[in-house]
Amino acid sequence: MTEWEYAKQIIDTIEQHGGEAYIVGGAVRDYVLGSLPDDIDLATSLFPEEVMALFPKSVPTGIEHGTVTVILDHHPFEVTTFRSEGSYSDSRRPDHVALGVSLEEDLLRRDFTMNAMAFHDGRVVDLFGGQHDLEERIIRTVGSPFERFGEDALRIMRALRFMSQLDFTLHDELREAASGLGHKLEQIAMERIAIEFEKLLTGPAYKKALGEMVELGIHRHLPNVTTELMQRVQEDNRTPVNAVSGWALFLYRAQDDGWLSPWKRSNAIKREARTLAQLCETGLDRMTIYATDEQTLSTYFRMNGERDRSRELKQSLPMTSRKELKFNGRDALALGARGEAIKHLLADLERRVILNELPNHETVLKEEAKRWLQRAGVF
Ligand code: ATP
Ligand code: MG
């Protein structure tokens, strides 16, 4: 069964029990565009407890917003009760959400006309001209952009990331509102901004979206982002191929190891981005290939638009880690080395094995270690 057929099954089940259900949001947008959606979200008139009662495998993944995840044959679907949002006094979150409203009201709370359509029985419910805007390749808010960005400034970032992902343009009034209300992004949780920014960076039209961001002055409300840095990133020949390579490009172009700190990314992302930025700085040699894991190397090749040689380069090395070195700390102790000398000796032998100056061979390394310790004055 395809994802659409599973979704249809959920809709049928809900309707057999007196409810209404529609496919909504990004999946409808992608359907109209003729592309396959990543995931299919549904909206229903039923309350979360009613949805859970109908589907044996369901998880209350966001019950306070009315969301239940229904699982059919291991395929998850988010099923959310029609909801409207109360006033936003903080430009971030609605003061309250009301469940159990109509489909129309549910569509009205959505950000852009292209994201505010519903699909049912082979027909698209399009109350705000979403299909027209998709055809014109224009991003337009549902209602006044000044009001909608005033309610939730994250929508400014979302507009720019969809611009990048779809290669669309922003409606004039939306641009004006984004420019005027960009400062409200400073009240939004950094994690949420960073997630939209990652999607922007990995979109096909990311340069256009970054250019628009500068033109609208939005970048001034993002941490550590200067106009100059934005220009340097756009001029770079490398391309972000995933989130971490996007961050790496900014790190490398900013020439600042701490650049990522305020963006609140995970330690794993920060570490890998730093490694990639370092590779951009130095290029590859045998030691950097040895020290970098294969997946990061692969990202490096892809962001440079080169054939991915990560596997073959890794395999061309005499060993993959210090553990494989045929001389270890205990061997060094046995030769009378102590403390710091052991560390330096092992690092030196390791480096020379990797550079093919020495074979990774027990007796050879032991003889070499003796000579090294003699030179270092241990004997
Ligand atoms: P993607 O394919 O990248 O997931 P999407 O359109 O599904 O795109 P989501 O972030 O998954 O984007 O959001 C799902 C839907 O929820 C959107 O299509 C939109 O209708 C609505 N939505 C999401 N965030 C907001 C928001 N900040 N304000 C209003 N509506 C929103
Ligand atoms: Mg989605």
Image (spheres, rainbow, N blue to C red):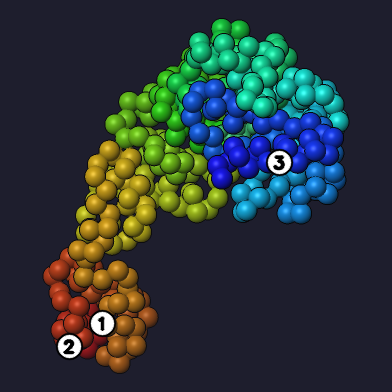
Residue 240 in view, yes or no? yes
Q: Is there CB contact under 8 Å for labels 1 and 2?
A: no
Residue type marked 3:
Ile
Residue 155 locus on image (x, y percent): 64, 24
Tell me the mark number nearer the camera, choosing from 2 and 3.
3
Residue type marked 1:
Lys
Left or right, 282 with reference to 68: left
Residue found 67% across the figure and 50% down from its top: 71
Instruction: Check disc 2 and report the residue beneath it.
Output: 363
Residue found 27% across the figure and 83% down from its top: 327
Instruction: Decide: is 228 above or below 194.
Output: above
Q: CA distance from mark 1 to mark 2?
A: 9 Å
Disc ID at residue 326: 1
Instruction: Check disc 3 and report the residue beneath it.
Output: 10
Q: Is mark 3 within 8 Å of ligand 2?
A: no
Residue 221 locus on image (x, y percent): 58, 25
**Based on the displayed image, in which of its 4 quarters is residue 255 positioned?**
top left
Q: CA distance from mark 3 to mark 1?
A: 60 Å
Identify the secondary structure beneath mark 1: loop
Judge by depth and name the residue closer to the eye, 161 or 182. Answer: 161
Residue 316 locus on image (x, y percent): 20, 63
Q: CA distance from mark 2 to mark 3?
A: 69 Å
Instruction: Decide: is 128 above or below 302.
Output: above
Residue found 24% across the figure and 45% down from its top: 307
Instruction: Decide: is 352 above or below 332.
Output: above
Residue 206 locus on image (x, y percent): 43, 27
Residue farthest to the bottom, as pictured? 334
Is tag 1's residue or tag 2's residue first in the polypeptide sequence?
1
Identify the secondary structure beneath mark 2: helix
